[in-house]
Amino acid sequence: MTRTASSVGIVFPQVAYFDVPLRLSSGTVLPHYQLVYETYGVLNERKDNAILVCHALSGSHHVAGQYAGDLHGVGWWENMVGPGKPVDTERFFVIGVNNLGGCHGSTGPSSLNPVTGQPYGASFPFLTVEDWVESQARLADHLGISTFAAVMGGSLGAMQALQWTIRFPERVRHALIIAAAPCLSAQNIGFNEVARQAITSDPHFYGGDFYAQGVVPERGLRLARMLGHITYLSDDAMMTKFGRELIGGAPHFSLEVEFEIESYLRYQGKKFSERFDANTYLIMTKALDYFDPARATGGDLAQALQPARAQFLVLSFTTDWRFSPARSREIVQALLDNRAVVSYAEIDSNQGHDAFLMENEDYFAVMFAYLERIAGECRP
């Protein structure tokens, strides 16, 4: 069936408050907290058409659509979620949530600590993927959803989807694991540490309590984001987009911006530093580092995934060197060892890790086909 794709249009963030304490993996207890989320589409009568979209490191609850008066701030997965798109909001009830520790309205380091009346800052606890999944399950309870048709995400979002199948196997019918790894390699942890050092060594960081100083560790955030962008793109994508083009056409023999790629990275770094919280960046990268479901089973990933009852779609991209296809195949093999129902596709793309956010004919064809199958299982 041919469908005409369109946007979900104007959307509105919502807030859910929780007074039941949440014990975190670190042992710290959050006595109460809030989660900001958005929903698109309509929850059917049987409440079996809900899809949870988990965001990656710099994402948020704003998955699709736009806010009134903001013509440019479309959701981070606008090409994937909406009427006639792979995650069709005429068929699914889609939920995007800003995770705990975030800086887009959910309780995080920049939130006021009710005990002190000041921002949490450095006192906000570190979080894990497991903590996020626990809080997301409480949001699902709040919305009256006992079982998700699917939980999905790319990168760090995919790790959350995978954790859902382990922690709440009876609440997930399908898991879409995109551009993922079962745990970070030492190299990836190293990239995250360099980014954190860029932030914490900024003289405006003040040990994480920069709010009281009325400053932002902008330089550190810019450098962290610039490093991240280099790892998210492939060499081919960067050469195709920027090459070795000089802005002025000839060398200036200076340390000023001369190459197009330099200009791009500085622009992205500056833009990011204006909208993202430094402490949130530290928390998110640490959550990436900590995730390792096989740690509790002596390194046996198949054993760690034994509780899972969902059906899986696992997708990787050929030029993703941050989370290479080999890492996705580790997940697939562990699922097959458990005789799980799993589909796998390795998509040919020159976009690197960010390919999961891009439009790609083969990628979208697989997503359309798999989600069509899920939609067929949902009753009106």
Image (spheres, rainbow, N blue to C red):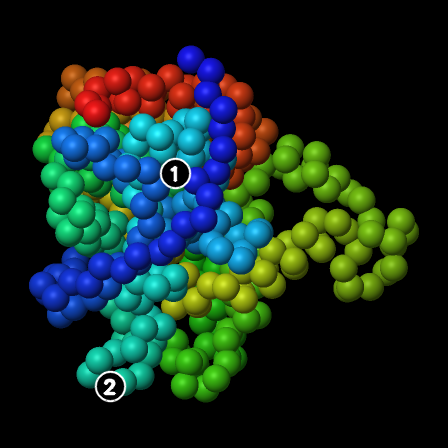
Which sits earlier in the primary sequence, circle 2 or circle 1? 2
Distance from label 2 to label 1 (Cα)?
Answer: 37 Å
SS of the residue at dot 1?
strand
Q: Which residue is mark 1?
A: 154
Is residue 20 visible from the viewing direction of this image? yes
Residue type at numbered disc 2 = Thr
Residue in front for this viewpoint, 207 or 279: 279
Q: How many neighbours does mark 2 have within 10 angstroms: few (below 14), some (14-19), or many (20 or more)? A: few
The answer to whether 344 is drawn above or below residue 6 in the figure is above
Name which residue lies at 48% across and 38% down.
Answer: 7
Residue type at numbered disc 1 = Gly
Name which residue lies at 65% across and 58% down.
Answer: 267
Q: Position of residue 131 (x, y in %)?
A: 20, 54
Q: Position of residue 180 (x, y in %)?
A: 37, 36
Q: Is residue 139 left or right of residue 69?
A: left
Name which residue lies at 63% across and 35% down.
Answer: 237
The answer to whether 29 is drawn above or below residue 95 in the figure is below
Residue that protrudes farthest toward the top in the picture? 1
Residue that protrudes farthest toward the right in the picture? 250
Q: Which quadrant is the C terminus positioned in?
A: top left
Q: Which residue is mark 2?
A: 116
- Residue 253's disc is none
Q: Which quadrant is the N terminus positioned in?
A: top left
The answer to whether 339 is drawn above or below residue 249 in the figure is above
Q: How many neighbours does mark 1 have within 10 angstroms: few (below 14), some (14-19), or many (20 or more)? A: many
SS of the residue at dot 2?
loop
Name which residue lies at 45% across and 48% down.
Answer: 10
Q: Is residue 98 left or right of residue 223?
A: left
Is residue 297 visible from the viewing direction of this image? no
Q: Position of residue 361 (x, y in %)?
A: 53, 21
- Rendered image quadrant of residue 94: top left
